[in-house]
Image (cartoon, rainbow, N blue to C red):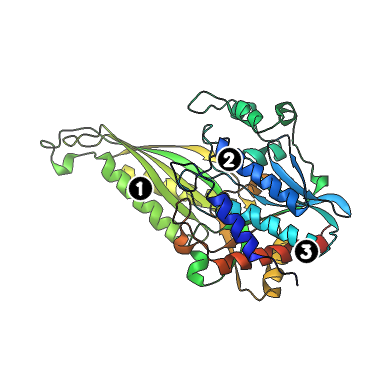
Amino acid sequence: MFNVSLERLKSRLDFLSTLTDPDLPFTRRAFTARYLEGRNWLEREFQKAGLGTQTDAGGNLIGRLEGKSPKALVLGSHTDTVRSGGRFDGILGVLSALETVQTLLENGVKPNHSLEVVDFLSEEPSDYGGLSCVGSRTWAGTLSGPMLALENADGETLEQAMKRMGADLKRVRSGPLRRPEELVAYLELHIEQGPTLEHAGIPIGVVTGIAGIERWKLSVLGQADHAGTTPMNLRKDALVGAARVVLELNTLAGMTPNIVATIGKLELSPGAANVVPERVDLLTDTRSIDSAALERFNTNFLERSKVLLESAGLGFSFERVSQSTPTVCNARVLSATRAGATRRGYKWLELPSGAGHDGAHLSSLCPVGMIFVPSIGGRSHTPEELTLEGDILAGTEVLLETLLELDRVMV
Ligand SMILES: [Zn+2]
């Protein structure tokens, strides 16, 4: 078995995580000077490790090791962060991938397939309309004209920002940057960003899929009346109705396997202390890796909410505002990951990813899989984000074993 260098990986994690916006901790927003500085450093690290480097037409930084076949097994993640992010989100995936490929090189392994370590451009919600996964969308050919026209607060378009990152927009507009025939599989190590692994005391999460997300806008319609003169039994209080809807969603999701549901946004009008609320607009966020279950859940929830509100004399309207389909991770990648964890003596647990990742966009091109390592307290996107050294080592070793297995069995 090959030994990865935890020391080397840790020193790279320390360097890149602290290459940050001077005013905010652990912040490297995509398209900024700091972000480019990090990528320039990363490119030199790729080269020092012996990888060929390239920034592709989508602005993705790629380190590549040629194998017996040009068809590539792709490892990767991202080096951009949210504002006041953490030390590990994204960069752990890129740097553990580099460590893995460097270890194979140092041990004289000539892989069957070419290996690529990719820093995908702008995975986190960007300053351009909040669009995420910009780089992986260019691979899949789903970065549309309206997306490219999104602007940041200074009026720069995403297209202009991508050009600054070295992207070739003519090529991006002309279709997918990669073809399925060029790719064997995509594999990403990432922090869990939730508490499941830590609670279970298990270091390795074998990711079964990336959740699809449905968002619905619900409006509860009552009547604005004087808070002092309207008797309690004659009110049509939209907020009281909305509160019932919130509880209904929470209770229903608690009873339904493989679903999480949240109402994180609520607008109340007229919003005055002395007026009975007339209208409440709520935004639901429901997630699952099972699209049929997600649809059933939302149909059921909306039906029950309607009945609840009608019986309270309130009006109700709803519309779906967004929908993304779940990604099912590839069975062969899952089995290679389970086998890899077992070979290294680590316990593993299968779990879905409730957060979005580049793999969701790459799944139209090739089999995808992800490996999670525990996030202490389930925290992420915050300076408190923490993954323990032992778990970083475990994740990297399992990444290496999975890569070797996929290189062996995939064609
Ligand atoms: Zn991430």
Q: Name which residue type carries label 3.
A: Leu
Quickly name the residue at label 1. 245
**Residue 409, image x, y percentages:** 82, 63
Mark 3 and mark 2: span between their CA atoms?
31 Å
**Is 302 on the left or on the right of 38, as rendered?**
left
Tell me which numbered mark, 1 or 2, is placed earlier along the sequence: 2
The one of 184 and 261 positioned closer to us in this rendering:
184
Residue 399, above or below 290: below
Quickly name the residue at label 3. 404
Graded by Cα atoms within 10 Å as few (under 14), some (14 to 19) or many (20 or more), the crowding at tag 3 reads: some
From the image, state whether disc 3 or disc 2 is nearer to you.
2
**Residue 397, image x, y percentages:** 68, 67
Quickly name the residue at label 2. 35
Secondary structure at badge 3 equals helix
Q: Name which residue type carries label 1.
A: Val
Secondary structure at badge 2 equals helix
**Residue 242, image x, y percentages:** 32, 44
From the image, state whether disc 1 or disc 2 is nearer to you.
2
Q: Is residue 337 visible?
A: yes
